Image (tube, rainbow, N blue to C red):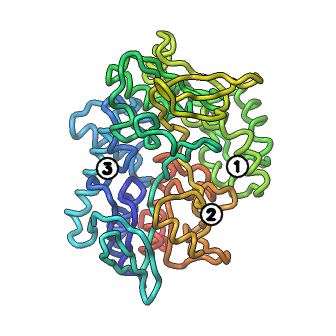
Amino acid sequence: MIRHVAIIGAGFSGSLAAINLARHDGPRATLIDRLADAGTGLAYGAAHPDHLLNVRASNMSAFPDDADHFVRWLDQRGVGAAAQSFVPRLVYGAYLRALLDEAIARSPGRITVLRGDAVDLAEHSARVIRLASGDRLEADAVALAIGNLPPHPPYGVEVNTLSPERYAGDCWSPDATAGLGPDDTVLILGTGLTMVDVALLLDAKRFSGRIVALSRRGLLPHAHAEPGAPWSHIKERPAIPMSALVRRLRTRGDEIGWRHAIDELRPFTQDMWRAASAAERARFIRHARPWWDIHRHRLAPSVADRIAALRSDGRLSVRAGKIGGIVDGPGGAHVQWRARGEHDWRTLVVQRIINCTGPQGDLHRATEPLLRNLAQRGDIRPDAGRLGIDVDDQLRTINAEGQANEALFALGPMTRGAFWEIVAVPDIRTQAWSLARRLSNAHWVAEGL
């Protein structure tokens, strides 16, 4: 019987799992995190006031069984944000902290927050979590809610030869955007949502130099549109292979608009992914993922306008190309790169390189001691696409022999290999809620009873 669940990671995924365990009258939970500010994680705790949510407030409730919860929370506090607005991420971080604080106060002894760094996990009569401090904690079950891993350095590029002043592998570190002069050039690796965040942060810090964003295809995220007239949604999962998804979206987009064509697939994308073969998934990741990402994960309109203004002013350049090498030299880092479709290499001298290529999940390249120890011992294994941790449909981790670990779970973005669409709040909240119901044995009870 599960009486105590240790949740490693107190960001959005882990905190929601603990809160829902209390909501479902389940086992007590201990949240373990190296950060002091539990409940927000990097996504909402390290944000700048200018950073907005990429989803409207109406779809940002923490609970799938209470769709208007976040909007009511805003109204009760006089924030004055309409349901269709894009509120600051710091406000959402305050919402999550408030939820965790309220759950702790409402259920004394049911949720404990432990500041520490979990570095290993052993299985005896119970799961034993070893912390970097030397302390140990026993639990009947463990949930890995570690969030996103930091981006890997570009393949073939020796960033270890660059000084910390030149290369920032952690774009959320205060040092990543500090100490820059008006004549400096910043190279951002990646052109997705993280690049947008860093460009806005540089602008907010009044950086007046040049920003160059580089990715293999040079694709930027699209913007949300204003809510339009309702349309007739599809009612069933399209009976097509993943290889036909792009063609289907183009056809459907001509009928109802591409945003609607993607949005109506949201209830079915996880099932489509799970039904696809390993070969179909690999082809999608290799060929279609960049286009899917820029259409699926969109910007708030005001953010898109600011990025457009930076480009129009010549302060932000977006380039498509490949890096061949980087050498620290006179005046900065000398970046050898080749524009997409060209044969000749160019050299760009920059004073700072910030890695915004997006979160990675390859366990074989992970530097986190906990993941490295679990993977090397075979307690967990990578999924077939090396997107994260292999799990089954009950979120049980899979060991090297292909067997499910009955008391070791994973949730959040590191389960994208199994579910694909598991990086946004609407998806993660359902996953955390479902896992908490299962661990509480509440999944045997019909909803609403």
Q: Nearer the viewer, residue 117 or 392?
A: 117
Q: Position of residue 213 (x, y in %)?
A: 54, 26
SS at badge 1: loop
SS at badge 2: loop
Residue name at image x 64 percent, y 49 percent: 268
Q: Quadrant of residue 84?
A: top left
Instruction: Report which residue position mark 1 lands on.
Output: 237
Residue name at image x 33 percent, y 38 percent: 174
> Nearer the viewer's eye, disc 1 or disc 2?
2
What amino acid is labelled 3 in the image?
Answer: Leu
Q: Quadrant of residue 140?
A: bottom left
Circle number at residue 442: none
What's the distance in space between the residues labelled 1 and 2, CA to CA? 28 Å
Query: Could you tell me if the residues under marks 1 and 2 are in contact, i.e. CB atoms within 8 Å?
Result: no
On the picture, is 7 further left or further right than 241? left
What's the distance in space between the residues labelled 3 and 2, CA to CA? 30 Å
SS at badge 3: helix
What amino acid is labelled 2 in the image?
Answer: Pro
Q: Position of residue 3 (x, y in %)?
A: 36, 81
Q: Position of residue 271 (x, y in %)?
A: 66, 55
> Nearer the viewer's eye, disc 3 or disc 2?
2
Please, is residue 279 above or below residue 111 in the view? above
Instruction: Report which residue position mark 3 lands on.
Output: 96
Q: Is residue 49 visible to the viewer in this orientation of the structure?
A: yes
On the picture, is 267 further left or further right than 173? right
What amino acid is labelled 1 in the image?
Answer: Arg
Label 1 packing within 10 angstroms: few (<14), some (14-19), many (20+): some
Please, is residue 358 above or below residue 192 in the view? below
What's the distance in space between the residues labelled 1 and 3, CA to CA? 33 Å
Query: Could you tell me if the residues under marks 1 and 3 are in contact, i.e. CB atoms within 8 Å?
Result: no
Residue name at image x 41 percent, y 69 percent: 119
Instruction: Report which residue position mark 2 lands on.
Output: 382
